[in-house]
Image (spheres, rainbow, N blue to C red):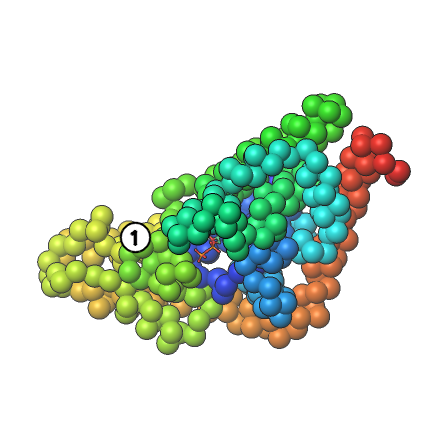
Amino acid sequence: MRALTGIKPTGIPHIGNYVGALRPTLELVGDKGCDVNLFIADYHALNLVSDRAHIRERSYSIAATLLALGLDPEQCLFYRQSDVPETFELTVFLTSFTPKGLMNRAHAYKAAIQQNREDGKSEDDQDVGVSMGLYIYPILMAADILLFDADIVPVGRDQRQHIEFARDIAGSVNAVYGEGTLKLPEGRYGKDAEELPGLDGRKMSKSYGNVIPIFAPDKEILAACKKVKTDSRRPEEPKDPDDSILYKLFKIIATPEEFQSFHDRFVPGGMGYGTAKTELADLLIAKFTGPRAEYERLMADKGHLDALLLKGADKARTIATATLDRIRKAGGFHV
Ligand code: ADP
Ligand code: TRP
């Protein structure tokens, strides 16, 4: 059984990413029941950032974050997408089996043309600002997955359509070259409850500027926690857990014991919001101080990170080459 997932190297990781993407990925690698591919989807980021220094730096940053949080690179295939060029040959192969109409239905593409309509662009101009990279993003993602015969793909719910596309595309290849040419992957979707609110109560997201970065200095973490939106209840008043961002943050981040202790003091009244904010900051600082030092150590030695990622890519390419040979053979190309 092989599980595979990719992380796009965009932005400095915040605790929303930690809860929604990094923590589940680390748990997956800790699960001895399956082989895991974990890769940094740097070509996917090219649609969003074209500054190469930025992409390189962010890729190192994601790699160092995962390692600092305890990822054991010996327990999985850990690599950068761009170091596995077989991905891109498979992408070209798959384009011939992907109806253009399927890509027209992709959420990200539809959102881009909808935005153009709302901006008053004419019918002829509806594709303005849409690169072919954005348009065929789902095909590249299908290649990432199909290249490794992945059985399961753990991702957020927002990725569901991409997994369905990967299955559709694999099905089209199999219809021509025979069942079993490509393996149809299954999506594994995270729980909705794991969506972390940001400082203002909207989903924590770098695009809303309401984030708490994982590895910020203590002072910055405390300052961010102080900004969490609260109502005007006094310390002795009971608090409404369903309406409290602080409570939700605590619940998702703390261990069950830490959370219970917080709950018992917060909900019935007695704890003021100021104290709750300091406790949240203390919790985050205690959790991330060790990993932060390790992160900084790793980021200071990019050569070591490169060596580690290239070692992972070497191993991944052994599998990728075998799959690609199988596909080239099926397609009648020289092997
Ligand atoms: P952002 O919204 O900050 O731009 P991304 O879209 O780059 O974050 O998300 C990267 C990963 O982190 C995705 O898997 C996404 O589902 C997860 N993620 C981002 N924000 C949150 C959040 N507030 N709660 C849970 N998961 C999140
Ligand atoms: N599209 C995914 C995201 O935005 C990242 C990704 C790229 C991915 N290739 C993948 C995830 C393959 C799982 C499998 O989060």
Instruction: Give 198 or 194, whichever is nearer the viewer.
Output: 198
Question: Viewer-proximal residue, 160 or 137?
Answer: 137
- Up/down of 182 relative to 249, above or below: above
Q: Residues within 10 Å of mark 1 (few under 14, many from 20)?
A: some
Which amino acid, by three-letter code, is at mark 1? Lys
Evaluate whether residue 156 shows in this view.
no
Q: Quadrant of the C terminus?
A: top right
Q: Position of residue 12 (x, y in %)?
A: 49, 65
The residue at 80%/30% (across/down) is 330
Q: Is residue 159 above or below residue 64?
A: above
**Residue 278 point in image, percent of width and height:** 28, 68
Task: Examine the rendering and report whether any part of residue 12 can be seen.
Answer: yes
Residue at point 70%, 68% (across, down) = 304
Q: Is residue 330 above or below residue 132?
A: above
State the residue position of label 1. Answer: 248
Left or right relative to 273: residue 279: right
